[in-house]
Image (tube, rainbow, N blue to C red):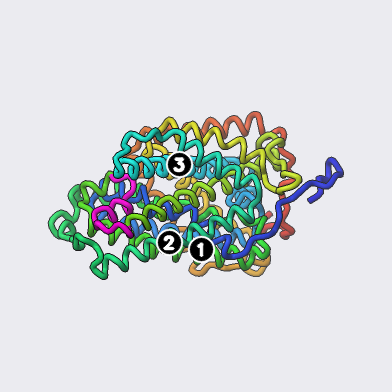
C-alpha cells in the first residue's frame, strides 16, 4: 500500500488465511460462551427462559452472520464493521463502531482471563489447595496471548483452530457420554414442568441479556478481511460455518447442564460445563471438560486480542486515532503497537471488575454494533443495488434479516436495562462523550480522501 502524501511504501498486513482460519477466529472467540456466562440467563428467568434466550439469540446472530458475510466479502479491509461504516455511512459512525468493536473484544478478553483463573482456583480447591491467588494467572494469560499475536497472525489463528476444535469436540463427547449413561446422576428435567418460568414471562425477556453470550463475537470474522487469501470465498464460508457450529454447541450445552444441575445453582455457576461433569462424577469427563474450558477461554482471549488490535490499528491508519497506532511490524507484519497498547486496558478490567459486569460491558458494546448493522445493510443495498458492484456473497430475504435484527436488539436493550440499567446509561454516556471528542477535535486530522479504498461507482442518489 502506498501513502500518496508521503510518497513512500507502507507495509501492509499479510494475506495468509483461509476459511478454516476464519472459522477458528469466529468460533474461537465465541465458544467460551458455551463454557461460561450463558448460564446467567437461567438465573434471570429459569430453564425455559434460558432455552428461549439461546434460540432467540441464535436467530439474532444468524442475521448478523448473513449481513456480515455479504458486506464484508465486498468491503475486504481490516477493521471489519468499522471499515463498512467508513465506506457506507460516514466518519462519526465509523469512529463509534470502531470503539464498539474494541470495547466489546477487550472486555471479552478480560472476562476470559477471569474465567481461566477461576477455573484453576476451582481445580486447586478440589485437590485441597484452595485459596489460589488468581491475579498472576490473569496477567500471564493476557501477556502470553498478546505475545503470540505480536509474533504473527498465521501462527495465532492456527493455534486457535486446534484448541477451538478440541473445545468443541469436548462438548460433543460430554453430550454423547451423558446420553449413554456414563453419568452417575441421570438427566432430570422436572424443573421444566414444576418451575418452567419462576419469574413469569418477564424472565424470558431478562434472560435475553445473557443469551447473547452464547454467540457474542462471531462478527469478529470480519476483522480478518484484509488477511485472507480470498475474501469473497473465505469470509462467507468461515462465518456461516461458524454460526452453525455455535448453534449446535449452544443447544447441547443447555441440554446437558440443565439436565444435571439444579437451575438455582446453574444460574450463578462460574464454569457450568465443568460443574456438570463434576455432578456426573466421571473423572475422565472432568479432565476432558477442564481441558475444553481452558482451551475455549484461551481461544476466545486470543481471538479478541486479534480483533481488537485490528480495529484499533485501522482507526490509527485512517487518523481517527493518532497515526502512531497504524504501524505494522517490519518483520512479523502485525499491528504491534495496537496489540501492546490494549494489554493494560484489558488487565485493568480483568483485575478490577467482577465477571458479570465485564460481560455486561462487552454485551452492550456488541449490541450497539449489531444495531448499526441493521441500518448499514439497508443503506448498502440502497446505495449499491445488486448488480452495481461485485459481491462475494448475497444474503437472501433482504430486508427481513435486518428488520428482525433491529427488533431483537431493541428487545435486548430492555432486557439489559432490567438488570443493569446503570451500566447501560454509563456506556451510552461514554460513547456520547467520545463522539463529541471526535467531532470537535480529532476529525480535523482525518484525511477523507485516503479512507475510501474500494473501487466502487458513485452511490445511487449522490
Question: Viewed as shown, does residue 284 lie left or right of 395?
Answer: left
Mark 2 surroundings within 10 Å by alpha-carbon count, few (fewer than 14), some (14 through 19), many (20 or more): many
Range of the magenta residues? Answer: 269-285
Asked which secondary structure carries label 1, the reply is helix
The alpha-carbon separation of the residues under discs 2 and 1 comes to 22 Å
Question: Viewed as shown, does residue 398 lie left or right of 437?
Answer: left
Front position in the image: 43 or 159: 159
Mark 3 surroundings within 10 Å by alpha-carbon count, few (fewer than 14), some (14 through 19), many (20 or more): many
Task: Give the total number of marks visible in the rendering.
Answer: 3
What's the residue at 18%, 56% (across, down)? 196
User: Closer to us: mark 2 or mark 1?
Assistant: 2
Looking at the rendered structure, which numbered label has been put on residue 45? none
| Residue 449 makes an appearance in the image | no
Comes first in the chain, label 2 or label 3: 3
User: Closer to us: mark 3 or mark 1?
Assistant: 3
Answer with the quarter of the image where residue 386 lies. bottom right
- Magenta span includes 80: no
What's the residue at 53%, 67% (across, down)? 395
Q: Looking at the picture, how far across and down is residue 345, in whole percent?
A: 53, 33
Residue behind mark 2: 168
Residue behind mark 3: 113
| Residue 257 makes an appearance in the image | yes
The alpha-carbon separation of the residues under discs 3 and 1 comes to 30 Å
Residue behind mark 1: 66
Amino acid at each position: 500500500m502506498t501513502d500518496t502524501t508521503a510518497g513512500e511504501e507502507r507495509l501492509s498486513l499479510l494475506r495468509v488465511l483461509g476459511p478454516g482460519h476464519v472459522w477458528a477466529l469466529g468460533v474461537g472467540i465465541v465458544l467460551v460462551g458455551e463454557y461460561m456466562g450463558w448460564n446467567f440467563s437461567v438465573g434471570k428467568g429459569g430453564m425455559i427462559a434460558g432455552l428461549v434466550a439461546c434460540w432467540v439469540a441464535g436467530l439474532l446472530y444468524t442475521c448478523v452472520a448473513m449481513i456480515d458475510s455479504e458486506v464484508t466479502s465486498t468491503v475486504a479491509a481490516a477493521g471489519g464493521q468499522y471499515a463498512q461504516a467508513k465506506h457506507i455511512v460516514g466518519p462519526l459512525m465509523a469512529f463509534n463502531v470502531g470503539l464498539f468493536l474494541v470495547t466489546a473484544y477487550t472486555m471479552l478478553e478480560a472476562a476470559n482471563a477471569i474465567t481461566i483463573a477461576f477455573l484453576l482456583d476451582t481445580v486447586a480447591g478440589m485437590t485441597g489447595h484452595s485459596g489460589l491467588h488468581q491475579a498472576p494467572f490473569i496477567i500471564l494469560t493476557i501477556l502470553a496471548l498478546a505475545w503470540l499475536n505480536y509474533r504473527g497472525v498465521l501462527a495465532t489463528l492456527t493455534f486457535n483452530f486446534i484448541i477451538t476444535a478440541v473445545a468443541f469436540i469436548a462438548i460433543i463427547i460430554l453430550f454423547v457420554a451423558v446420553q449413554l449413561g456414563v453419568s452417575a446422576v441421570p438427566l432430570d428435567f422436572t424443573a421444566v414442568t414444576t418451575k418452567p418460568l419462576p419469574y413469569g414471562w418477564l424472565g424470558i425477556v431478562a434472560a435475553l441479556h445473557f443469551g447473547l453470550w452464547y454467540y457474542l463475537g462471531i462478527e469478529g470474522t470480519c476483522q480478518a478481511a484484509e488477511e485472507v487469501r480470498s475474501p469473497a470465498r473465505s469470509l462467507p464460508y468461515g462465518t456461516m460455518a461458524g454460526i452453525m457450529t455455535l448453534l449446535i454447541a449452544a443447544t447441547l450445552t443447555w441440554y446437558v447442564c440443565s439436565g444435571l444441575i439444579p437451575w438455582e445453582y446453574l444460574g450463578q455457576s462460574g464454569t457450568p460445563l465443568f460443574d456438570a461433569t463434576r455432578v456426573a462424577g466421571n473423572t475422565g469427563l472432568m479432565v476432558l471438560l477442564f481441558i475444553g474450558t481452558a482451551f475455549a477461554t484461551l481461544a476466545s482471549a486470543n481471538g479478541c486480542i486479534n480483533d481488537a488490535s485490528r480495529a484499533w490499528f485501522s482507526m490509527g491508519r485512517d487518523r481517527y486515532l493518532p497515526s502512531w497506532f497504524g504501524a505494522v511490524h517490519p518483520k512479523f507484519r502485525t499491528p504491534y503497537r495496537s496489540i501492546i497498547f490494549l494489554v493494560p486496558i484489558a488487565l485493568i478490567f480483568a483485575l478490577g471488575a467482577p465477571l458479570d459486569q465485564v460481560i455486561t460491558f462487552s454485551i452492550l458494546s456488541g449490541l450497539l454494533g449489531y444495531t448499526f448493522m441493521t441500518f448499514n445493510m439497508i443503506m448498502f443495498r440502497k446505495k449499491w443495488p445488486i448488480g452495481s458492484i461485485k459481491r462475494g456473497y448475497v444474503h437472501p430475504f433482504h430486508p427481513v434479516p435486518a428488520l428482525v435484527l433491529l427488533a431483537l436488539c431493541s428487545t435486548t436493550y430492555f432486557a439489559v436495562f432490567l438488570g443493569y440499567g446503570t451500566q447501560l446509561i454509563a456506556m451510552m454516556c461514554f460513547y456520547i462523550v467520545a463522539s463529541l471528542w471526535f467531532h470537535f477535535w480529532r476529525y480535523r486530522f482525518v484525511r477523507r480522501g485516503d479512507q475510501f479504498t474500494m473501487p466502487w461507482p458513485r452511490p445511487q442518489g449522490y
